[in-house]
Image (cartoon, rainbow, N blue to C red):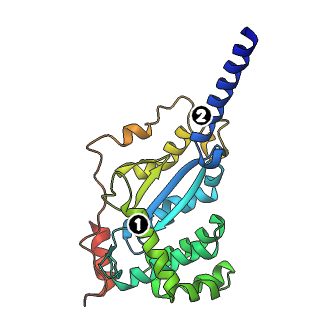
Amino acid sequence: MASRLHHFLLLAALLLLIGGASSAGDAGNGKVRMELYYESLCPDSFQFMVDSLARVFKDGLLDAADLTLVPYGNAKVDAHGAITCQHGPEECLLNTVEACAIDAWPDVNVHFGFIICVEELAMEYKHQEWQSCFQKQGLHPKPVMECYKSEHGHKLSLKYGRQTDALVPRHTSVPWVVVDGKPLYDDFGDFVAYICKAYKGRPPKICQHKEPGRDYPTVQQAAEPGKRVGYNSGDVVLNDGVDDRTKMARADDN
């Protein structure tokens, strides 16, 4: 009887260890889930992606995190399934293009490079040249070109819309960063610290430069009430008869 109880306790302890390890990452790989909800022509979105996310991506972000990109942001869907984007039709097009890139090249190393290329062009007000990113990244354009012009591309955008609308709590601004299931609100710029805090096991290289014993905020602290201030680009609208560059420059000045 005692031996049977001993085996039962050992099994229970083992299950607890396995459950704890898998909760920190996706599919039990120890990595921390990170989701970025954004829109392609939002100044804060592309500045965060190009100036912050792309830099740490090169430094080994994927050693610590499973990154998911969700290109939709503050778009709306009417009763007939038509999508209206915050920065006009060009943003809807690029949101769909980037959704198609994720679908065509599921490897985040591949689609992230293409998407960052597009967002760099957006920063330079050259987003109409997005097709040049195929050649720059050494990618064949056919799967994305066929996708974004088709119903499949539209369905992908609707899927990302449903995913965005299902957020709890709902997003209040873009970019909207979620780490380990918790939103960072206006602290999204410190996403690496939150990832490293949530990471279980031996710290990967990207976390090893952190000062030993530094008191990083927890994800729960970031989600406290009152930390909802963030960028909401409702005053920036493209294709309304005003020069795009002028209007986006106004947003940057604010």
Q: Is residue 140 visible?
A: yes
Question: Which image quarter is the C terminus in?
Answer: bottom left
> In terms of depth relative to the viewer, which is nearer, 51 or 21?
21
Mark sitting earlier along the chain (2/1): 2
Q: Is residue 219 left or right of residue 207?
A: left
The quarter of the rendered structure image containing the N terminus is top right
Q: Name the side, left or right, on which 46 lies relative to 139.
A: left
Q: Amino acid at mark 1?
A: Arg
Residue that appears at 57% across and 39% down: 210
Inspect this view and state whether residue 209 appears.
no
Question: Which residue is denoted by mark 1 in the rendering?
Answer: 162
- Which residue does the numbered mark 2 point to in the structure image? 20
Q: Residue furthest front?
A: 1
As rendered, which of 14 and 67 lies closer to the eye?
14
Q: Quadrant of residue 233?
A: bottom left
Q: Residue at x 51, y 88 (%)?
A: 150
